[in-house]
Amino acid sequence: MLDEVDKKILNLLQKDAKLTIKDLAEQLNLTTTPIFERIKRMEREGYIAGYVALINPQKVEKSQVVFCNISIRDYAPQNIQIFEEAVQKMPEVLECYHLAGTVDYQLKILVKDIQEYDLFVREFLKMPMVRVQFSSIVLHPVKYTTMIQV
């Protein structure tokens, strides 16, 4: 169970994962040893899943976000497994959610432009069980965060 100090550490690390143990200790008015021990415990217990660098998509020429909604034609366990394993291997797919409702999956796709998305969809549709219900082209992001308030 997380206490208030743990939550403060998590919130600070989410804002800047490069903060040192010393920086965190100073901001929380604690010594470095308990901060270090708390972070290691939260890593062991799975509260901290990893550390990443967030890349600016425009700088790497991948600024077109598309939400693609997929249905599986024959909704059988084997087709679901094949689809999900294929999606895991697609670098363009940043996120994929299995949904309940009229659409089976929603994918968040990051590509250079609409032409690259068109090529992606053409390859994607080679899987016979896949049916693209509709795609939503993002004009511009209004809010983007990876921070989970704890």
Image (tube, helix red, strand yellow):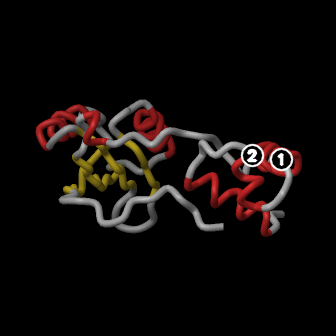
Q: Is residue 139 above or below residue 48?
A: below
Q: Position of residue 38 (x, y in %)?
A: 83, 51
Horizontal and vertical percent position of residue 3: 82, 67
Camera-side residue of 118 and 54: 54
Task: Locate the N terminus and report the quarter of the image it occupies.
Answer: bottom right
Kindly report the distance in space between the C-alpha atoms of the residues bearing marks 2 and 1. Answer: 6 Å
Q: Which mark is residue 22?
A: 2
User: Percent from the top left, x then y, of residue 16?
Assistant: 57, 50
Going by the numbered disc 1, the residue's amino acid type is Thr
Q: Which of the marked residues, 2 or 1, is nearer the chain's N terminus? A: 2
Dividing the image into 4 quarters, which one contains the C terminus?
Answer: bottom right
Using the image, determine if residue 127 lies above or below residue 130.
above
* Residue 32 x %, y %: 83, 47
Q: Which residue corresponds to mark 1?
A: 32
Q: Quadrant of residue 124?
A: top left
- Depicted 15 relative to depicted 61: above or below: below
Badge 2: how crowded within 10 Å, few (<14), some, or many (20+)? some
